[in-house]
Amino acid sequence: MTSRKAGARSGSQKKPFWREYGEALFIALILALVIRAFLMQAFSIPSGSMKPTLLIGDYLLVNKFSYGIRNPLTNKVWISLSRPQRGDVAVFIFPQDPTKDYIKRVIGLPGDRIQIINKQVHINGKLYKTAEAVYDDPLVIPPPQGPTDSTRDNLGPVVVPANSYFVMGDNRDHSYDSRFWGFVPMDNFLGKAVIIYFSWQGPPGEPIYVAFLGGLKGLISHLSWNSEDFRIRWNRIGRIIH
C-alpha cells in the first residue's frame, strides 16, 4: 500500500524548470535542423544579377525538397523526386567555389544545344525568350576571338552535359553565370526559390543592422524614421518567385 502511494506521488512530480525548458529547446533545435537540412532554407540576395525578379535586400525561402532528398553533408541526392525545370529560379553551390551559393534561372537542360547570338538565346536552334530577362547595355560584345574575350553576348553553340544545367541571371548584362564559367551539376543544386518573406532597402553595401540603426537614429533625434537608411519594401513581402 505504501509503495503504491509513493509511486503515485513520484509520478505526479513535475520536472525541474531547467529540464522542462531544456527539453523544449532541444526538440525545437532538432526540428529547425531537420527543416533546414531537408525542407526549407532561408537565403538573402547580395547582388543585382537577378533584377528585377530579385533585388538586393530580398530575403527568400528555398524549397530544398523540390529537387530530391539529399545528404545534408555532401548534398548528394538520396531520393530523386524531381529535377530542375526550364525557368526555375534555383539556388546552387557555385561550381568554381563550394563556399559560395548562387541563385540564377535555369535556361538549358541536359542535352540542350545552347547558342547566344547578339544577346539572343537559342535553344536547340529556336529562339528562346523569357519575360523576366532584361538588357540595359546597348553595347553588343562581338563573338570571342580568344580565351580571354567576353562571352556575354555571343556564345557557342555548346551542348549541356548529362546531369548538368545552363543557368543565367535575369539581369543579363550584369550577371556572372554559365556564359562565363560553365554548367551546374545536378549535385550542386540546393533547391527552388519559392517566396520572398522579407525585403528592405538602404545605402548600397551597408549591412542590415547598420542600416536599421541609421533609421532608428532618425526616429530618436527627429521623431521620424530615416527611410533613406532603412526602408521595408512591404509590396515585395509574400511575393511568389517565378
Image: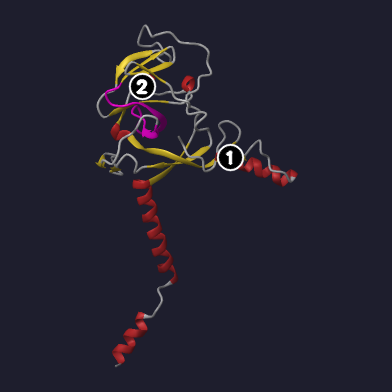
User: Which quadrant of the figure contains the C terminus?
Assistant: top left
- Give, as a three-letter code, the residue at label 1: Asn
Q: Looking at the rendering, which quadrant does residue 62 occupy?
A: top left
Residue toward you, 90 or 206: 90
- Give, as a three-letter code, the residue at label 2: Trp
Which residue shows up at 57% across the image and 42% down it?
Answer: 209
| Residue extending furthest toward the front | 126
Residue toward you, 93 or 18: 93
Question: Magenta residues?
Answer: 88-112
Image location (x, y in percent) of residue 38: 34, 46
| Residue extending furthest toward the right | 222
User: Which quadrant of the figure contains the N terminus?
Assistant: bottom left
Q: Is residue 103 above or below residue 63?
A: above
Residue toward you, 126 or 89: 126
Tag 1–tag 2 contact (CB < 8 Å)? no
Image location (x, y in percent) of residue 138: 53, 13
Which residue shows up at 43% across the image and 40% down it?
Answer: 194
State the residue position of label 1.
Answer: 235
Image location (x, y in percent) of residue 156: 34, 14
Q: Is residue 46 left or right of residue 114?
A: right
Which residue shows up at 51% across the image and 11% down it?
Answer: 139
State the residue position of label 2.
Answer: 181
Instruction: Tell us which disc is closer to us: 1 or 2.
Output: 1
| Residue extending furthest toward the top | 145
Q: Is residue 112 left or right of residue 238?
A: left
Q: Is residue 155 magenta?
A: no
Secondary structure beneath label 1:
helix
Image location (x, y in percent) of residue 171: 48, 24
Residues under labels 1 and 2: Cα distance? 35 Å
Secondary structure beneath label 2:
helix
Assess disc 1: are there few (<14), some (14-19) or many (≥20) residues with their C-alpha within 10 Å of its C-alpha. few
Which residue shows up at 32% across the image and 25% down it?
Answer: 183
